[in-house]
Amino acid sequence: MTVRTRFAPSPTGYLHIGGARTALFSWLYARRHGGQFVLRIEDTDLERSTAESVNAILEGMTWLGLDYDEGPFFQTRRFDRYREVIQQLMDAGHAYKCYCSKERIDRLREEQMAKKIKPRYDGHCRGGVEPPAPDAPYVIRFRNPVGGTVVVDDLVRGRVEFSNDELDDLIIQRSDGSPTYNLSVVVDDADMQITHVIRGDDHLNNTPRQINILKVLGIPVPVYAHLPMILAEDGTKLSKRVHGERVSVIQYRKDGYLPEALLNYLVRLGWSHGDQEIFSIDEMIELFDLADVNKSASSFNPEKLLWLNQHYIKAMDPLHVARHLSHHLGLMGIDPAPEPDLHEVAKAQQERARTLVEMADISQFFYRDFDTYEPQAAKKHLRPVALEPLQKMREALATLEPWTPHACHQAVKDVSEALQLNMGKVAQPLRVAVVGRAASPGIDVTLHLVGREACLRRIDRALEYIRQRAEQGADA
């Protein structure tokens, strides 16, 4: 048997962190077992589904690197197939028309709740009724078996039994002719030959209903694995309404996270392999097993994710970091294609940033002049006493050949020795002049990447700043 899994989001918003974990677990299971991973867009909710949400889901999947072998398939393009199956159920007596009005259903529900009975359809139309009018609206309900149990041998939760008497006759076609979730998902999983359904445990109560439909259609039942929910730090379910944009996958891209860091974090939300914390994609594929998924909910810890992101920024190939850094520089209006080499910039900054947003921010000076100096850095280092060291450095850099990190370092050393100053007395004013603040990579790398022309231009500006400061009576 070839393993076939699927990820089936509804396009009513962005790709949620919980959905991304479900996609990851489904993708890993398929990849580990040499199977196929299918992407399906469940867009039968016509009022809430949008093209923007579809694009957001596809963007999130692409950024995470969760490639799919088939799809995306759209349910709205399969309505004829759903109607065909619904008619098949009707012809076989496994479904029937229900003419109950919304008012009757609401009244029934109120009465049941008042009696502390679980609200469920009472089967009023199950035996067949005359239409109240020739054009009376109706829904189509599945005739759920009476008596007995439905057993779900869940790969995460174990054996779960449901009594058929607790399951009412669910609606499989709305009054407007559109299919409902429980019908369309059964048909899709069957037609797409899905062998393993991996999804959130909020769908567990749907599973016995879907199994009953599969059985009367004579279709093999897939293996199910229901993943526990993800909780926020406050113990509540992670949701956009409560926790805002932090539940969106694309928000983490905007915030400067590497996809590998987010994937590593998500795979550890409910799954473990000993005490190991860091997993490459290849290791995830090799080691992931649904049997090791916890039954209990997991808590989302932003600090742990940030720690992982910093680890990945430090540890990954600078070329890979540079590819993602380019996106964030572009958002700042910086074209990183000209000099300096973005790969070299990323390499220089890898130890200095927790996120790519931070890295882009502290790397702006490599590509464009800054408007102001950091106040404390200028006050401390751009004083009249720094005038001579900066003038000497300008002279040295103007004719320096070759323009290499080693040569730049030697120039700073030579000026320091000539003026009988500690190197920091020369390097720090020079750093603030060229960078705008007191922190940057090594002065040799900084000068080399900024380039001769920009260095000289910025030193001239700093010299003028110091002269003006002296005229205003600043301390030497």
Image (cartoon, helix red, strand yellow):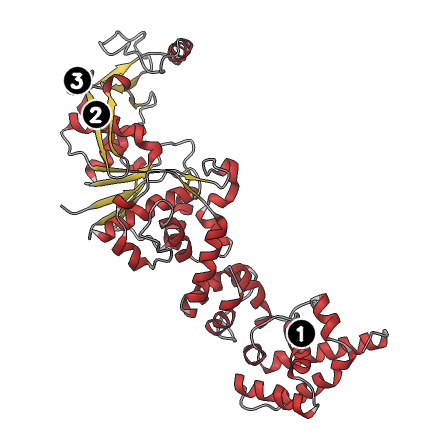
Placement of the C terminus among the 4 image quadrants: bottom right
Q: Specify few, some or many for label 2: CA neighbours under 10 Å numbering under 14, 14-19, or 20 or more.
A: some
Residue found 73% across the figure and 75% down from its top = 382
Q: Earlier in the sequence, mark 3 or mark 1?
A: 3
Residue 135 or residue 267, whichever sits in front: 267
Residue 150, disc:
2
Residue found 30% across the figure and 11% down from its top = 122
Quadrant position of residue 264: bottom left
Seen in the picture, residue 138 relative to 332 is either above or below; the reply is above
Q: Amino acid at mark 3?
A: Gly
Seen in the picture, residue 184 relative to 475 is either above or below; the reply is above
Q: Are marks 1 and 2 in contact (CB under 8 Å)?
A: no
Residue found 78% across the figure and 79% down from its top = 384
Q: Specify few, some or many for label 3: CA neighbours under 10 Å numbering under 14, 14-19, or 20 or more.
A: few
Q: How many marks?
A: 3
Q: Is residue 223 left or right of residue 355?
A: left
In the rendered image, residue 403, in percent from the top left (x then y), is placed at 54, 86
Q: Do we see residue 253 in this rendering?
A: no
Q: Specify few, some or many for label 1: CA neighbours under 10 Å numbering under 14, 14-19, or 20 or more.
A: many
Residue 319 or residue 290, whichever sits in front: 290
Residue position marked by numbered label 1 in the rendering: 432
**Marks 3, 2: nearer the viewer:** 2
Placement of the N terminus among the 4 image quadrants: top left
Residue 93, disc:
3
Q: Amino acid at mark 2?
A: Val
Seen in the picture, residue 406 relative to 202 is either above or below; the reply is below
Residue 95, disc:
none
Q: Earlier in the sequence, mark 3 or mark 2?
A: 3
Residue 355 or residue 90, whichever sits in front: 355
In the rendered image, residue 326, in percent from the top left (x then y), is placed at 48, 64
